[in-house]
Image (cartoon, helix red, strand yellow):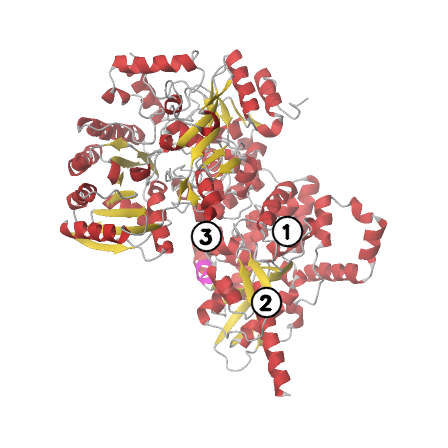
Amino acid sequence: MAAKGIKSNDKHILNLAAIVGGERSILYQKEDLVAYDCDGFTLHKHLPKAVVFPKNAQEVARLVKYCSDNHLPFLARGAGTGLSGGAIPLNGEVIISLVRMKRLLNVDLENRRAVVEPGFVNLKLTNSISDKGYYYAPDPSSQYCCTIGGNVAENAGGAHCLKYGVTTNHILGLEVVLPNGEIIEIGKNGIPDSPGYDLLGLLTGSEGTLGIVTKITVRILKNPEAKQTVLAYFDKVSDGSQAVSDIVSAGIVPAALEMMDKIAIEGVEAAAFPVGHPRDIEAVLLIEVDGISAGIEEQINQILEVCKKRNVREVKVAQDEQERGRWWANRKTGFGAMGAISPDYLVQDGVIPRSRLPEVLERINKISEDYGLRIANIFHAGDGNLHPLVLFDARIPGESEKALKAGSACLQVCADVGGTITGEHGVGIEKREEMRFVFKDEEIIAQTNIREVFNPDNLLNAGKLFPSPGRCVEIKTEMKAAASR
Amino acid sequence: MSLKEMALKQSPACGSGSLGNYLWSDPPDESKWADCVHCGMCLESCPTYEQTGMEQHSPRGRVYLIKSVAEGKLEVNEQFMDPVFACLDCRACTTACPADVDVGGLIEEARGQIRQAMPLTGVKGAVNKFFLKGLFPNHNRLNAVGSLLKFYQKSGIQKVVHKTGLINIMPQHLVDMEAIMPEVKEPVRKKYKHEPVIKAKGETKNEVGFLTGCVMDVMFSDINQSTINVLTRNGNDVVIPQNQTCCGALHIHAGDRETGRKLAKQNIEAFQDVETVVVNAAGCGCMMQEYAELFREDPEWREKAEAFSAKVEDISKYLHDTGYEKPKGEINTRITYHDACHLAHGQGIRQQPRDLLLDIPGVDMVHMPNADRCCGSAGIYNITNPEMAGAVLESKMENVPDDVEMISMGNPGCMLQMAMGVKKYGRNQKIVHTIQLLDWAYQKGEAAVNKEGK
């Protein structure tokens, strides 16, 4: 029988193993499961019941049906790089890992679309079509390793979303296994905008609470004819952020417009991809413009002009692709780089009106002082998506809890100035409670009612995305307990 | 009896050095995993994660498990051993990691603990002991094996074994290896036994020590000869200290840090009179640059090890930094270059060997995709984990361009593994060490000059 070699008497383990074809496609022993007790968000941890590795949609459907019939909680996981805890098995779920479903199924250049399995890594898509002059636009910083399935679940963004939009703007069709085990297709043949409700839009960014995606049709784009990248160093954050506003109001839509503050610079310069940013500046801007060749030069000149007007200390244009690559590697590994200056970090994901940045940074600075924790800021400045990185040491009793509170306080600031609590990382476990900063109870209930249509027994990824109404106090206690673990 | 009780009974060498469920001295270094923030940027760099998709077979997962043992959440047992020993030690994750986490160092330290908690027994133990303790550190025995191999190849026994089907009784992965064993020649250490300094041709600019290596000198003595030729041609006096020994990499990869330390001490002393130690095997060079890691609890030797490591240089970097004569002889060939893990990821040497090759007239370099992806050799990994090594080799071979005649690289383990790949997948590339090509180009240039002169 297929469950040969399984050292367990648990009938569920044996049955799940039989569905995926045996011992090489299931993990159920503690030593193996420990590695799955969290994802890129490490403040909550829980062991899953098992991890299974299906090969195709049919196996996913059978696994889902089995779990559903037997009332076993379950969830889907990609590369586990999510930053809000969406793949953490809070309820001892069976984890359905999609990483072995990693084929590029079809590339249709004529219609500019590609079909991938959910475990296909984001950057591999661009790498597979770049020689033909095409690319896949959404570029989260984790694109070297995150999966497109995970990107769909979280509606991932990235540095170039300012001009090109987030994942949902690039999804043309999905094959989905519903929580009852049924396989459905949305956006058939990659033709979007079907009549009726926008289910693609609903599924994308649903954080794995409505279904498990098993096939994705994405839009691919032609490489821009030309590209130029600029680095600008500012002595004052206010000048830097004013420059951001000026660039946008000058009518330029940069492909990317990124900012890092002093502590963030300290981190990336101490880590694996330093580029020699001065340490005594308050802000660095990384600006990229792309499009047809004619006009790029003019845009760059305009940007240089704006920066000078805002007292830039130094500004330079990347001389070649290598230099550009180094600047981006420095920025894109920014989160992980915090490991070089702090044992742990908690990244927040607020969105604010661009113009309020100096004020927001000042208030975050105050939070940092109040909690006695350093906070670095990495900012998709162009679209107002702020990532405060709260640095802490989980080994010091009480510090994890303080970090959570400081992070939450940062989000409160974002909500206060008319922004919101997440731009691209999702709510997950991390920001469930902060949903209350932006939604009333009735609004939350309206949304969980939608969930119930798809996921009536709430066996799929329960406890994510929304606070349970009236459980506010309990959740806080849970967070506290988790933080002290 | 629990593991803890057993350990206490055996009274570890330095009980005070233990950490969580690591009960022996020299445990994995907490400050190394403190840098890991669990971001996952390492995942795609890892060949074993690529093959399995399993988190515990990824760098992030391994670091997490190693940390969990220190926190007392897991014990040192079979289930923990599996992912830690399945690591190829290729260091690709070190290149990928934004926070410079020393995953390789942690793996080696964890292996040291595992080997002490669970000593190898039975056949595995005997084989390990034979190769690692009896053979590699013992120069004479290695030579004897070399002679036997030579006898095996020359005497016709090899033919008989193949004809009679006797070869079929060997496990398949050993059959694959046997088929590509290079022809054994005289080791340079034997050849130059009575020549304490091999003088530079022409004016002496530098004096360098040369690590002849264990496997290298027995199986690939012609590469060692080429290295000496290239060094002396470029104004270097070459010293081959006779009391040098195996670098210890294989022992340390296998968790035998005690023997590793012994060998390290011997090499540190053997090379104390030279300013530079040139190495032509990436794995050995990388190991010798990390000797200090072995002496974390011994400040005196740590200092000596640090001074020693600073002297160690790979041949390609040494030539690149000190300058070399551009060869004049043409080698008309299409060639591709494979980055040995312990050159690219271990020592950050990528461009220097490529530049050497590009300086040879006639060489047409073809880019190999994922050139810095492990080939699966990984020391003796291909012997201990043949299945995984085979899978890793298969993806490597898929990346070798079709129309090249040679694959060049800077590490003997890779050379054997890639030769096996070429044979197994019906390809016809020749496997060469970068320095051999340079030597041949010099020789061809000379031959041309001599001809003209006549």
| Chain where mark 3 sits | B
**Boundaries of the magenta span:** B305-310
Q: Is residue A43 left or right of residue B84?
A: left
Mark seen at residue A352: none
Please state which of the two labelled residues, at mark 1 or mark 3, is closer to the viewer.
1
Residue B210 found in image quarter: bottom right
Q: Nearer the viewer, residue B260 or B319?
A: B319
Compare marks 1 and 3 and give the one earlier in the sequence. Answer: 1
| Chain where mark 1 sits | B
Q: Amino acid at mark 1?
A: Leu
Q: Is residue B367 above or below residue A132?
A: below
Label 1 to label 3: alpha-carbon separation? 24 Å
Please state which of the two labelled residues, at mark 2 or mark 3, is closer to the viewer.
2
Q: Is residue A291 magenta?
A: no
Q: Nearer the viewer, residue B64 or A231?
A: A231
Disc 3 marks which residue? B298
Q: Is residue A304 left or right of residue A59?
A: left
Compare marks 2 and 3 and give the one earlier in the sequence. Answer: 3
